[in-house]
Image (cartoon, rainbow, N blue to C red):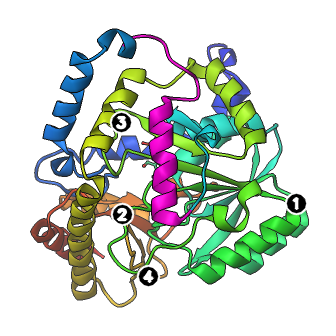
Amino acid sequence: MTHADAIFSDRISDVPRSFIREILKTTVRPEVISFAGGLPNRDLFPVAEIEEATLHVLRNNLKDSLQYSTSEGYLPLREYIAARYQKRHGLAVHPDEILITNGSQQGLDLLGKILLNEGDHVILEKPSYLGAIQALSLYQPRFETVPLLASGADIAALAEILQRSSPKLFYSVPNFQNPSGISYDDTTRRAVADILRAHRTFFIEDDPYGELRFRGKDQPSFRHYIPEQTILLGSFSKIVVPSFRLGWIVAPAKIMERLVVAKQAADLHTNFFCQKIIHRYLTTNDVDVHIATIRAAYGRQCDAMLQAMRKYFPPGVSFTEPEGGMFIWATLPEGQVALQLFDKAIQNNVAFVPGNPFYVTPGEYRTMRLNFSCVDPGTINAGIQRLGAII
Ligand SMILES: Cc1ncc(COP(=O)(O)O)c(C=O)c1O
């Protein structure tokens, strides 16, 4: 370690850099067809409605909206979220069980802060959301990973880990996971809930994509099965706009008490002005109609990608068939390495994210993440054709 490096904590030195940001830099040339991003489609942002809501907040009680506010978050917004859980899922959530956070990403940081000591065992899915690997790494846990099958977590592997290492948490994205697009079916949800109940392990259910289902039927939240052990993360990023950085945590009272303390210590409260704008937007527009538009567009784009993959990829390539969300996960034939393919792909003006950053251990991975939310069907077809030719 150099003298200059000695200034840094062990905590930050252990955290992987966001490799995706490095990759995205190579994909900005206009001639590159990029499936590497992970952004919601900006053409679907409700621009006029947000403008109206902003003007409303600017013109009514502005002094109120410019003042400090409560750490828990704007009560009418928490009431809206609670009512939506009731309406969509038949889930009883009290507004006091909700904390508004600076995106669900902050939720991950706060949970790491209040729950993890160095060396605590945490279960992640394999592959897992890179942002969770980063956020939780800061608290220096020991990660265990459970493979994902087409139906969700591998139950036998999960049971074995729980038996062996008494982890504190299982972090999961059970709906249209980032990066794999995989969702847990109901049988798997029940089985996972049963084992976690028996071991008293907490389940962090990160659900930013649950409303973006374009096929199949909604599955129950883990809060239905293990309410006292489920911590639910939600977000407006994928259904309204990401720039407001508005997300939330739903947690049982005992956890919430500590979360509020951690939130105060971190930033006192989430941007109040934006909370008021989104509340105005949500209560004066039909959000379900807006979300249906996103779902229909992403569904068409996903179908275009799947069709092109069936047509242009060699038979040795396998891939997931998501029922929602923004990503497809492909596995290359034995012997191929996704990172090497990435270099060739960039030379041929097509980009994806190699699977590597979504694993906690280094390796020569054959997997890749393909994003379909920001590319139109015609361009998707052309890009997958290019990629197929390279594979
Ligand atoms: C699984 C998952 N969790 C959390 C986040 C962070 O979302 P937010 O914008 O709410 O912080 C993302 C963003 O891509 C995500 O994919």
279 vs 247, nearest the viewer: 279
41 vs 368, nearest the viewer: 41
SS for callout 4: loop
Look at 39% across and 75% down and name the residue there. 323
Q: Which residue is mark 1?
A: 165
Q: Which residue is mark 3?
A: 279
From the image, state whether disc 3 or disc 4 is nearer to you: 3
Q: Which mark is residue 212?
A: 2
From the image, state whether disc 4 or disc 2 is nearer to you: 2
SS for callout 3: helix
| Structural distance between the alpha carbons of marks 4 and 2 | 30 Å
SS for callout 1: helix
In the depicted structure, whether residue 240 falls above or below residue 8: below
Q: Are marks 1 and 4 in contact (CB under 8 Å)?
A: no
Inspect the image, locate mark 4, and give the three-letter code of the amino acid beneath it: Pro
State which tag comes first along the sequence, 3 or 4: 3
Asked whether residue 86 is drawn in magenta, I would say yes
SS for callout 2: loop
State which tag comes first along the sequence, 3 or 2: 2
Look at 65% across and 61% down and name the residue there. 223
State which tag comes first along the sequence, 3 or 1: 1
Is ligand 1 closer than 8 angstroms to the Cβ of mark 2? Answer: no
